[in-house]
Amino acid sequence: MNRTFIIYAILISLFITTLGFFFYFYQQVQIFDKKLEETNSSETRSSKHHFVLIGEEMGHDYWRLVGEGAKKAESRYDVVVQYEGGPKRSNPDEQLKLFDMAIKSKVDGIIIQALNDEFTPMINKAVKKGIPVITIDTDAPESMRSTYIGTDNYKAGQMAGQALIEDTDGKAIIGIVTGGMDKDNHQHQLRLEGFKDTIAQVEGIKIVAMAESNLSRVKAEEKAYEMLTEHDDITAFYGTSSLDGMGIVAAANNLNKNDLYVMTFDTLTENIRLLKKGKIDAIVGQQPFEMGEKSIEIMLDLLTGGNSVQDVYQTNVTIIRTSDLPLKGSERMGLLD
Ligand code: BGC
């Protein structure tokens, strides 16, 4: 066993790893193209337009609803929608890869959640190649996208702050669990800024701890648990993504903290169940189904000169408390049952 052998061994493993990566990426492109071909040939041979919609996380209830909205629009118009729920777990780099594949496949329109600054050049690349882009759920306002469809995330944060002030009579010591704290994460930054700016106007409210859940329920629980053990005086939690509330409630249960005020995002079935039980106090309700549906309609109008194209199509945000149950009308659109 000498140095030459070790060097050869390293070189060979490097070669194999590179080959592995290359093969993986090549396979992904093939799968993507195959899906596109299948949608083209089987669904509607006569369809004129092919759109790709890329979400944040495959199998996530929120993104499933976005997909259902898009598919509803697909059934009404002469289009084919290739719905990519997103990577298995939230991963902006993987999302960007799917985005790049869609550009390479020369689809007619791309609908994408623009989670951070890295999406702007990719959006511009698509537009320069003649593919219009709509941002959904999270915007890239500096990019060349045509329209943003979704929540005004700053306003949603403000509404959350206002509701918390009202529900706690202006007295609360707050822990925040946020999907992502990275300064580039547009959505959670805005939800935090809106919230902080609003509660800053009230003296009796202060934030003592903040941590990131990475959109994972387990991580939200772990972080809330840590916060509650380090800050015994926390009386309220603000969770900025769908699964944060569930994690916070689980941590509170473990520590027998039964009188915490909990606010979270999205009317997922489990959140509604916890709201009914009084474990969650308020939910910031968004309209994922409508986002998906509108994104297809507006993309079609973009290509056919229709009149619904606008810079921003804002979907409704509501604060939902136990007294608002059962949900009615458009609020039910966000509900999975
Ligand atoms: C956000 C989505 C996110 C989802 C997952 C929602 O509140 O709007 O962007 O993917 O939560 O937790």
Image (spheres, rainbow, N blue to C red):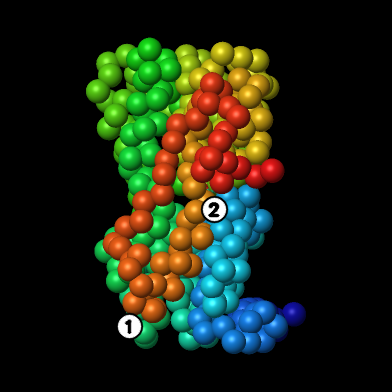
Q: Residue at x 63, y 50 (%)?
A: 61
Residue 289's tag is 2
Q: Earlier in the sequence, mark 1 or mark 2?
A: 1
Q: Residue at x 60, y 69 (%)?
A: 75
Whether residue 271 is situated above or below residue 141 in the rendered picture: above
Whether residue 150 is situated above or below residue 209 in the rendered picture: below
Q: x, y (%) of residue 177? A: 49, 35
Residue denoted by label 1 = 128
Q: x, y (%) of residue 151? A: 40, 48
| Helix, strand or loop under label 1 | helix
- Number of residues whose C-alpha sits closer than 10 Å to that of mark 2, classed few (under 14), some (14–19) or many (20 or more): many
- Which quadrant holds residue 297? bottom left
Residue 32's tag is none
Task: Name which residue type carries label 1.
Answer: Lys
Whether residue 316 is situated above or below residue 221 in the rendered picture: below
Q: How many marks?
A: 2
- Which quadrant holds residue 280? top right
Front residue of 301/35: it is 301
Q: For the C terminus, give its image quadrant.
A: top right
Task: Name which residue type carries label 2.
Answer: Phe
Q: For the N terminus, give its image quadrant.
A: bottom right
Q: Residue at x 59, y 62 (%)?
A: 72
* Identity of the residue furthest to the left in this view: 201
- Number of residues whose C-alpha sits closer than 10 Å to that of mark 1, classed few (under 14), some (14–19) or many (20 or more): few
Mark-to-mark CA distance, 1 and 2? 29 Å
Front residue of 83/95: it is 83
Of circles 1 and 2, the one toward us is: 2
